[in-house]
Amino acid sequence: MALCYLNGEFLPLAAARVSPMDRGFLFGDGVYEVIPVYGRRPFRLEEHLARLQKSLAAIRLSSPLDEAGWRAVVARLVGEAEWEDQSLYLQITRGPMAVRNHAFPKEARPTVFALAEALSPPPPEQVENGVAAITAPDYRWLRCHIKATSLLANCLLRQMAVDAGCAETVLFRDGVLTEGAAANVLVVKQGVLHAPQKNHLMLSGITYDVVLELAQRHGLPVVVRDIFVEEVFAADEIWLTSSTKEVLAVVELDGRQIGAGAPGPYYRAMYRWYQAFKESARRG
Ligand code: PDD
């Protein structure tokens, strides 16, 4: 039976109970993290916890646990889960309210929830052949740097891709690339990796950072700048990055072939570098 953490207690997931008056349930008033775990070692834990603090600060909620507290919760869940490789979920909401009211309660009692699940990286055929994606206007709010649990727009946008038989929806705001429904998006053109600039219109991806670091370490030139819609279609390669997808090549966008229509040489190199980096993290 899966073990979870809820408000100071470790208990079976099936026994966990949250009030229907919780602001996470009624308003999506909360933030979260998804942390990959390899060989029971959380990957980039410090960076994920730092991003969680930023998300909490951005929604004006103080962290219910200090760093040592978070690390203790993580260590117990990761240690007791049945899988070596896991996807660790952390969520904090502004907690329950006495009566439904948009304004914050005077004294919030945050609800803290954490759960380890099995990590399912992309299947080998997706790594080998790449995936198809569609595009859509980015109609989300203007605070996409906050990893908020209010993900209705992201869910609708991801479902558009699923309905089209695709893996992801690539989003553009005023003709400029932002990210995917649940991943960052980077492109390669003529041997240069182009990454969108981090700002309030996209999530600052931990995997995005790892990929840029690996590119720099291995001598692949990187340019961080606004990327326009026509450049994405004309790219040699398009990559998706996320904690659960790692790095995945998009080979078809809105039915149009990208590059050679197969994962390109830079993708293959980055995939190798990423796997090697992961394995070194797994060994500690
Ligand atoms: N999502 N952008 C969005 C909108 C995301 O939801 C995610 C990840 C990313 C990539 O961030 P990172 O590399 O730190 O995982 C970018 C997670 C995996 C999720 O919601 O399940």
Image: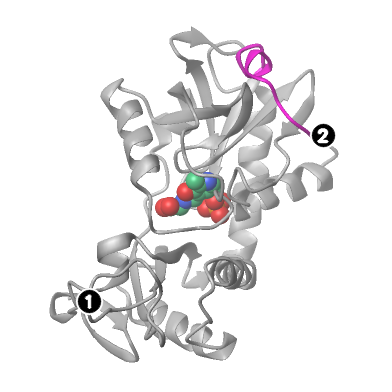
Tell me if residue 8 can be seen: yes
Residue at screen point 37% across, 86% down: 109
Residue 56 percent location from the top left of the image? 54, 71
Quarter occupied by residue 186: top right
Residue at screen point 67% across, 16% down: 236
Residue at screen point 68% across, 16% down: 231
Residue at screen point 68% across, 34% down: 269
Give the amino acid at mark 2: Val
Determine whether the residue tagged by mark 1 lies in a helix, strand or loop. Answer: loop
Give the amino acid at mark 1: Val
Quarter occupied by residue 126: top left
- Of 232 and 268, nearer the camera is 232
Tell me if residue 242 can be seen: no
Left or right of 162? Residue 33 is right
Q: Which mark is residue 223?
A: 2
In the image, the residue with mark 2 has its CB under 8 Å from the nearest atom of ligand 1 = no
Total labels drawn: 2
Residue 187 percent location from the top left of the image? 67, 27
Give yes or no for residue 172 being in the magenta stretch.
Answer: no
Question: N-terminal of the two: label 2 or label 1?
Answer: 1
Left or right of 4? Residue 37 is right
Left or right of 195? Residue 157 is left
- Of 84 and 36, nearer the camera is 36
262 vs 6: above or below: above
State how the image is colored.
Answer: one colour
Magenta range is: 221-236
128 vs 196: above or below: above
Q: Which residue is mark 1?
A: 99
